[in-house]
Every structure is written in structure tokens, then in C-alpha cells.
Image: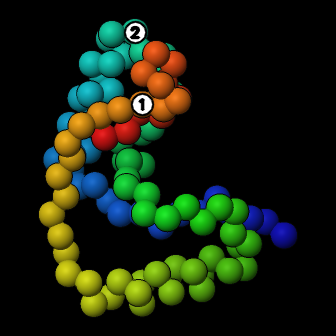
Amino acid sequence: MARTRTFIGIDIGDAIRASAAALQKELTKAGAEVKWAAPESMHVTLLFLGDVDDRELHAVCKAVRAAVADEPAFALRVAGVGAFPNARRPKVVWA
């Protein structure tokens, strides 16, 4: 059966997305050899679920929606940038 790599995440909003895309451009100019994420796919991962059986995806989405239905919206601010495994050989750049 097919499986989908799945996580629970939140959207970062247009302002943070634009700042992150600008940072990508600056780091590229500086010679960083990183496979960049497309700005539209940028997010904050809250929980990585791994490979979920496709037959269970609807139930997972429904459970997450129910869990957050009464939660209010909140502001998100990003401060700081880093990389792992390290800044000299970044595989992931995070903010």
C-alpha cells in the first residue's frame, strides 16, 4: 500500500515567507550550495509523523483539524538563522 511522508505544520505567512526567500537569494549569492525549498512550501513543522499509510491520511487530517478547531490564531515572529549539520556544510537552513 502507498505511504505518504507526513507532518503536522503551520503556515509561516507571507511576510516571513518573503524574508526567507530574500535570505535564500543572499545566501546563494554568497556561494551556499544548498537545495532550497520553494517559498510556497515553507512552513513550521510541529510534529513529523513519518510515512503514513494513504488509507489513514483522511483520518489523520480530520483528527488534527478537530484538535485545533478551538485554538485561536497567533502571531509568529522569527529570530535567528542556523544550519545543520553545521554552517560550513549546511544540509538544512532554519530560522
Residue at point 48%, 32% (across, down): 84
Residue at point 33%, 19% (across, down): 27
Q: Circle 1 — which element?
A: strand
Relative vertical location of residue 6 with respect to residue 35 in this rendering, above or below:
below
In this rendering, would 34 be left or right of 70? right
Q: Residues within 10 Å of mark 1 (few under 14, many from 20)?
A: some
The three-letter amino acid code for the residue at tag 1 is Ala
Residue 61 horizontal/vertical position (percent): 52, 79
Q: Which residue is mark 2?
A: 31
Query: Of discs 1 and 2, which sits in the foreground?
Result: 1
Residue 78 horizontal/vertical position (percent): 21, 46
Residue at point 15%, 63% (across, down): 75
Relative vertical location of residue 9 with respect to residue 31 in this rendering, above or below:
below
Q: Which residue is mark 1?
A: 83
- Number of numbered labels in the structure image: 2
Quadrant location, the C terminus: top left
Using the rendered view, name the quadrant where residue 3 is placed. Answer: bottom right
Residue 18 appears anywhere in the view: no
User: Hey, which residue is sitting farthest right in the picture?
Assistant: 1
Relative vertical location of residue 90 with respect to residue 3 in this rendering, above or below:
above
User: Hey, which residue is sitting farthest front in the picture?
Assistant: 86
